[in-house]
Amino acid sequence: MLKLKEVTTVIGGFAAIRNVSLEIEKGEFVALLGSNGAGKTTLFRTIAGVLKPANGSIEFKGLKINKLPPHKIVALGLSLCPEGRQLFPQLSVYKNLMLGAYTRRKDPKGVQQTLEQVYELFPILKERRNQPAGTFSGGQQQMLAIARALMSKPDMLLLDEPSMGLAPLVVQKIADAIKSISKEMGTTVFLSEQNANMALMITDRGYVLENGKLVLSGLSRELRNNDMVKKAYLGA
């Protein structure tokens, strides 16, 4: 479904992503691990079209998307839930969700069905749909950010650091929701996380990114038992 070949992204003269090649098949649940500054967000922004690669190719569902603008990539079925949530704090929960459905504005019936799905996934959003997003707690804002990304009805969801800055109890709720998105909604999920323990407990397999380069890949259970991963990311 997603295929990167020798992708390099340059920011301010610095190669933040270097010769990254990876593949994710339809229906997979894959983790991208790495410390702060490893290049995870840059890689996700490159896949989503916010940044353009200097070299290499990105294919989604067999189509080359390197040069497409972000809204066309969303329309193809690939959605990014960005690091830091990036909500519109003055707007209501409902209006934030509707902005996520912008590419589907000609399908009001389908949008309503997706809205009911995200309300089922995150009931708090339905209860407080008229409340400004900026009045939500960090965990509630993260739920809204994920739900907004789902409103485009993506075939593949990129989740960038969804557990960042959240209390352990809230992290577990978010992890459970992401599992539902993958297993019950059938969405292909690519999850970027510093919280390697959480990521490797819920995903099928993973990649490890260091200084803009992929240094390791494997099944999640194998990565959990890898000495380098344990030492660098699991605190073992």
Image: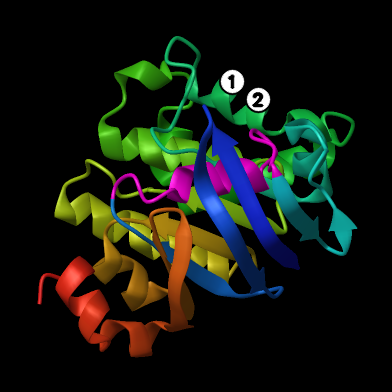
Residue where numbered disc 1 is placed: 95
The percent position of residue 116, horizontal first and vertical second, equals 62, 45
Which region shows up in magenta? 36-54
Q: Residue at x 35, y 61 (%)?
A: 175
Asked whether 222 or 27 is in front, the reply is 222
Image vertical order of residue 121 relative to residue 197, above or below: above
The percent position of residue 229, horizontal first and vertical second, equals 26, 76
User: Quarter-wise, where is residue 62 in the image?
Assistant: bottom right
Residue where numbered disc 2 is placed: 99
Determine whether, in the image, residue 154 is placed left or right of residue 198: right
Mark in front: 2 vs 1: 2
Determine whether, in the image, residue 50 is placed left or right of residue 120: right
Q: Amino acid at mark 2?
A: Leu
Asked whether 13 or 79 is in front, the reply is 13
Q: Amino acid at mark 1?
A: Lys
Q: Secondary structure at mark 1?
A: helix
Residue neighbourhood size for the residue with mark 1, other residues' Cα within 10 Å, grouped as few (<14), some (14–19), many (≥20):
some
Which quadrant: the C terminus? Answer: bottom left
Determine whether, in the image, residue 68 is placed left or right of residue 182: right
Q: Are marks 2 and 1 in contact (CB under 8 Å)?
A: yes
Magenta stretch containing residue 151, yes or no?
A: no
Asked whether 153 or 45 is in front, the reply is 45
